[in-house]
Image: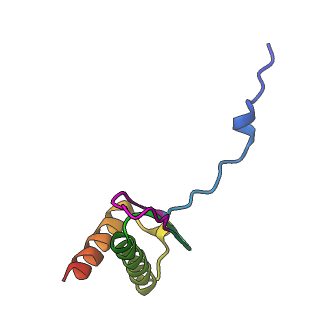
């Protein structure tokens, strides 16, 4: 009996890429809002909600830049800490 590798075993694994996804569900004005950035995609939401998602994504990226890191290099714990810090600052 001859064993062969399956197609998936022959294909090199795809490189992982981290990204933020924001989904707003409170739009009532019929507008379709989509914003894409280097490592984020934001969809939907009211004008206010979408604006807050934009500000949050930009400020997370700014903090990552200050740390000299990319989102791909950030652990889930560190990302959560950055995100909570940004959200706290936006709410003030």
Say which of 28 and 82 sits in front: 28
Residue at 36% of width from left, 75% of height from top? 56
Q: How many marks?
A: 0
Name the residue at the right extreme: 2
User: Does the magenta run of residues contain 29?
Assistant: yes
Relative placement, left or right, of 92 versus 4 is left
Residue at 18% of width from left, 83% of height from top? 92
Identify the main secondary structure in magenta: loop
Is residue 13 depicted above or below 38 in this figure? Answer: above
User: Does the magenta run of residues contain 28?
Assistant: yes
What's the image's color scheme? rainbow
**Image quadrant in which the N terminus is located:** top right
Snapshot quadrant of residue 10? top right
Snapshot quadrant of residue 21? bottom left
Residue at 22% of width from left, 76% of height from top? 88
- Residue 33: x percent and y percent? 48, 67
Name the residue at the front extreme: 29
The stretch in magenta equals 20-33
Say which of 22 and 76 sits in front: 22
- Residue 38: x percent and y percent? 56, 74
- Residue 60: x percent and y percent? 39, 77
- Residue 14: x percent and y percent? 65, 52
Is residue 4 depicted above or below 18 in this figure? Answer: above
Name the residue at the left extreme: 92
Name the residue at the top extreme: 1
């Amino acid at each position: 009996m001859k064993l062969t590798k399956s197609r998936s075993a022959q294909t090199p694994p795809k490189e992982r890429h981290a990204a933020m996804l924001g989904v707003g569900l409170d739009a009532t004005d019929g507008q379709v809002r989509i914003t894409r950035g280097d490592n984020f995609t934001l969809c939907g939401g009211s004008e206010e909600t979408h604006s807050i998602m934009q500000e949050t994504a930009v400020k997370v990226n700014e903090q990552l830049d200050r740390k000299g890191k990319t989102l791909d290099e950030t652990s889930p714990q560190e990302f959560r800490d950055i995100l909570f810090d940004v959200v706290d600052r936006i709410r003030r």
